[in-house]
Amino acid sequence: MSTPTKPTILIIDDDSEIRYSLSRVLSSRGYQVLEAPSGEQGVAAVKKSPPDLIFLDIRMGGMSGIEALQHIRSTNPKQMVILMTAFGTAQTAIEAMKYGAFDYIMKPFDPAKVLTLAENALKAHAEISAVSDYKPTINSEDYKEGIVGSSPVMQDVFKIIGQVTASDVTVMVTGESGTGKELVARSIWKHSHRAAKPFIAVNCAAIPDNLIESELFGHEKGSFTGATGQRLGKFELCDGGTIFLDEIGDMALATQTKILRVLQQGEIQRVGGVETIKVDVRIIAATNKDLEEMVKAKTFREDLYYRLNVVRIRMPALRERVDDVPQIVDFCLQNLVKQKKARVSKVSSDTLAILVRHRWPGNVRELENVIYRSAVIAQGDTILPKDLPQEIRDAVGAIPTIPPTAAVQDIPMAVPATSAPFDAMRTAASEGAALARARVMAEAIAASAPPPLTIEQALDFLHTELGKAEEPILERIEREMIRRVFVTQEGNILKASEKLGITRATLRKRIDELGIKV
């Protein structure tokens, strides 16, 4: 049986005493240490036989450390390099990280810190080496819609998009912030007969109430202070095309009345004007608010609600479709490479595991931002766990584990509902390892009710339920989900059904079948 090869570390420094002392420290840990007295010789040695790690002095006669680093990284982007300097300036730190150094260390050395840095760099080197060449899960042309996902809930979204593109029916897109509601609107427009005409997106929440009518319908000269000339509104500019009214729930009642007129009669009137102008515009609206509750509170017009809500498309939260996370990561990386915003093209398996397990309260938008931030921070061409924001690592690390049991492995398929939490449970019951299935089901429980229910509490509940054998575990979990939602929604069956993502009829049926006391 062969003995594992010790990692090789190359020291590049024109000071022989530094090389000697650093060599002794590293050799004491069993590393194979090589030396080079200049930047030129160091670069040549790396080209001949790349070491696992390099300690490189910044200030040397001849080729400087920064120049040597650029040469080394241009030929081997994965090479781990720790820069050494006696001058810890801001410029030093910026230059070191700009050109891809793993880290830098100040002279004189603290032996313990040298060894810790070496261990961390070698661990990162091993993780990067273990990552196979990046192969996207699907081809880049399949991402042209911008909406990424192959999970069952997303397939349902794609089907509805396809069904509504053939007509001019008004569509309401709902879902949490960051789920991609505007992408749905753009996809509908792109595949409709209006694709050759304009698409205009308006964020109703970003425009003050006293300006939104002018923004949407235009104004006449002198109609208000500052109106120095006539201005065409979005509806006129979008004639023949599609207008996307995002955050429609933030629109003032007075403006809602005028939107209703557009939907009913296809005409507008500029602010300060008397002329009625005909417009042919398809409206797609979106909101993350509960419009039904706003209608009850009389903060949103009921007639407008029914006009807008002809076809509803609900964009699921990212936690409801965790199977799509790898594809979304692919999409983000391909975009970064295509736009030359970062050199990263891969993620390690450990990194992907963390991303899949995170709850993503900010949904796809948050995931995209994390990938972009991590790609900028990463020293090589691979995003490692250490490159992720600390809060992401901490949040995932805080999720407890529960032991797999025979009860989890034999979960029956007993729920006919179509809600996202139920879909997650059904997927968990049929795919993956026992522990993974248990975790997904626990997350489904947590997703079905607002705080104070946490993933930890859901896991505790699931762990307790696994020890019972009176009835199928899936039905017990479903009963608990429904019970918790009814408590948090104060017994309101409409609100409870919306929270669970099922119809009131389905919810009533399950209440009767499961013997739940409301």
Image (tube, helix red, strand yellow):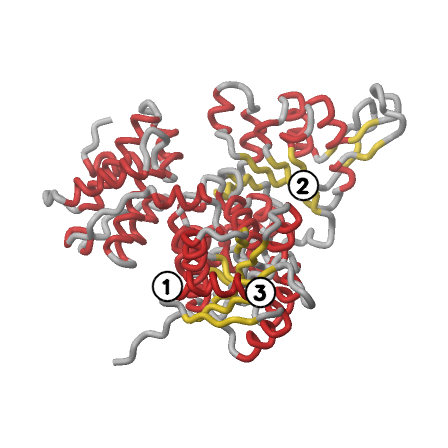
Residue underneath mark 1 = 28
Q: Quadrant of the C terminus?
A: top left
Distance from disc 2 to disc 3, alpha carbons, whole Å, reads 58 Å
Q: In x, y percent, where is residue 179?
A: 51, 44
- The picture quadrant where one finds residue 333 is bottom right
Q: Nearer the viewer, residue 395 or 464?
A: 395
- Can residue 325 be seen from the camera position used here? no
Q: Quadrant of the N terminus?
A: bottom left
- Residue 201: mark: 2
Q: In x, y percent, where is residue 153?
A: 42, 50
Distance from disc 2 to disc 1, alpha carbons, whole Å, reads 64 Å
For label 1, count other residues whose C-alpha is less than 10 Å away and answer few (under 14), some (14-19) or many (20+). few
Q: In screen coordinates, is 364 left or right of 222?
A: left
Q: In x, y percent, where is residue 69?
A: 61, 64
User: From the viewer's perspective, is residue 513 above or below residue 369?
Assistant: above
Q: Are marks 2 and 3 in contact (CB under 8 Å)?
A: no
- The picture quadrant where one finds residue 222 is top right
Name the residue rendered at 35%, 45% in the picture. Answer: 397
Residue underneath mark 3 = 13
Label 3 sits on a secondary structure element that is loop
Q: Are marks 2 and 1 in contact (CB under 8 Å)?
A: no
Distance from disc 1 to disc 3, alpha carbons, whole Å, reads 20 Å
Callout 2 amino acid: Ala
Callout 1 amino acid: Ser
Q: In screen coordinates, is 191 left or right of 163?
A: right
Name the residue rendered at 75%, 37% in the picture. Answer: 234
Q: Nearer the viewer, residue 99 or 280?
A: 99
Label 1 sits on a secondary structure element that is loop
